[in-house]
Every structure is written in structure tokens, then in C-alpha cells.
Image (cartoon, helix red, strand yellow):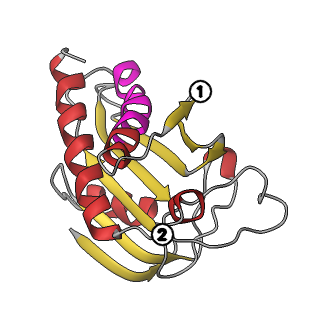
Amino acid sequence: YLFRPVTGSTNMDAKKAAEEGAPEGTVVVAERQDAGRGRRGRAWSSPEGCNLYFTLLLRPTCRPEQASMLTLVMALAVAEAIGEEGISVGIKWPNDPVLNGKKLCGILTELSVSLETQEPEYVVIGIGVNCNQTAFAPEIADVAASICMETGRPVDRSLLANAMLRQMLALARELQSGRA
């Protein structure tokens, strides 16, 4: 994996690594992102030292339309990994893990397709999970959650990251093999 104490965006770092030949399964992790983003170019707040910010690089062997399913698969992987801690997480369509009806996590998937073959070259899947954050900006306080705020107990981020990556890689392999 590649660790960045501070970066603009783990997705941008993972795309650069992919272009430089990094293998499938490469993970870029950061303590803080200065330019974290969500869908439709929305900013993703990434305060230092309390949440998880990482991007997984995959090199799928499927059609581009199948690769788009990876976003849904990753939401399931996040929910299952958090569920291993005895916390029941739902998924709000299309890919938002929620806890007590509030958004817990952001997932941003970006696909690079070969212009020559129209096959996927790589997919980067960025994950931002609100783990131990204790407050949110007023404009999102009613819709955002952290695991700690909702359960009253802190989260071991490294254990949770490992559980998420294990689930993500297993489900991604199932999807690519046609079993998912």
C-alpha cells in the first residue's frame, strides 16, 4: 500500500499509480485529504486523524458496464465490514452506507477505459468513512453520521480498514468471476 500523511485526493494518487503500472490491489491511504471529493464534484471533508480515507486500485477483466457494478459491491463490502463490529449498516441507493438513516460513508469510483479496445484499464474506488468524527458542519449535521457519534464508542480505524479491504477484494473477485 501507499501511505500519504496528507494528499490532495487518494483517488488522484491511485490513478497516477495505475498509470505508472501499479498492480491490482494497490491501496492508497491518507490521514487527510485537502481535495477529497464525492460524486458530481462535491467536496468531501477529510479532517485529519479521525476517519478512513483510502482508494483501492483494481484492474478488472470485465466489460465497462460490469465494472460500474463495483461501486455497488463496495457499498456492500463497507456495510459488511462494519457489520463485523456488531453495527447494523444499511445502504441507501445507489451506494451510500447509512447508520440510523444518516450517511456514514462516501464512495467514488472512477473508470479508465482503453480508447483502442474499449476494455477497462483500471478502476479506482475511493472510500471515505466517518469513523471517530465528533461533529459535522451545520449544513450536513442532519444527514451525516460517524460510527462513534451513532454508537458512542470509538473505532479502531486500522482494523476496520483491513476488514473493508478484505471484503472489497473478495466481492470484487466474485463480481469479475460472474458469481456475484
- Taking depth in this image into account, of 82 and 24 the one nearest to the observer is 82
Residue drawn at (30%, 60%) of the image: 161
- The earlier-in-sequence mark between 1 and 2 is 2
Quarter of the image that includes the N terminus: bottom left
Quarter of the image that includes the C terminus: top left
Residue drawn at (62%, 47%) of the image: 103
Using the image, determine if residue 80 lies above or below residue 8.
above
Residue 85 appears at what percent x and percent y? 33, 52
- Taking depth in this image into account, of 168 and 2 the one nearest to the observer is 168
Q: Pick out the residue farthest to the right.
A: 139
> Which residue lies under the disc numbered 1?
93
Using the image, determine if residue 99 lies above or below residue 115.
below
Residue 160 appears at what percent x and percent y? 31, 59
**Number of other residues with Cα within 10 Å of mark 1, as a class: few under 14, some 14 to 19, many 20 or more:** few
Residue 72 appears at what percent x and percent y? 43, 30
- Taking depth in this image into account, of 148 and 129 the one nearest to the observer is 148
Q: Give the side of residue 101 with respect to residue 70, left or right.
A: right
Whether 43 is among the magenta residues is no
Magenta range: 64-77
Q: Could you tell me the amino acid type at mark 1?
A: Trp
Q: Could you tell me the amino acid type at mark 2?
A: Asn
**Number of other residues with Cα within 10 Å of mark 2, as a class: few under 14, some 14 to 19, many 20 or more:** many
Q: Main secondary structure of the magenta part?
A: helix
> Which residue lies under the disc numbered 2?
51
Using the image, determine if residue 58 lies above or below residue 55.
above
Distance (Cα) linking label 1 and label 2: 23 Å
Whether 71 is among the magenta residues is yes
Q: Pick out the residue farthest to the top.
A: 178
Residue drawn at (18%, 36%) of the image: 170
Q: Check disc 2 and report its element: helix, strand or loop.
A: loop
- Taking depth in this image into account, of 11 and 75 the one nearest to the observer is 75
Residue 140 appears at what percent x and percent y? 78, 57
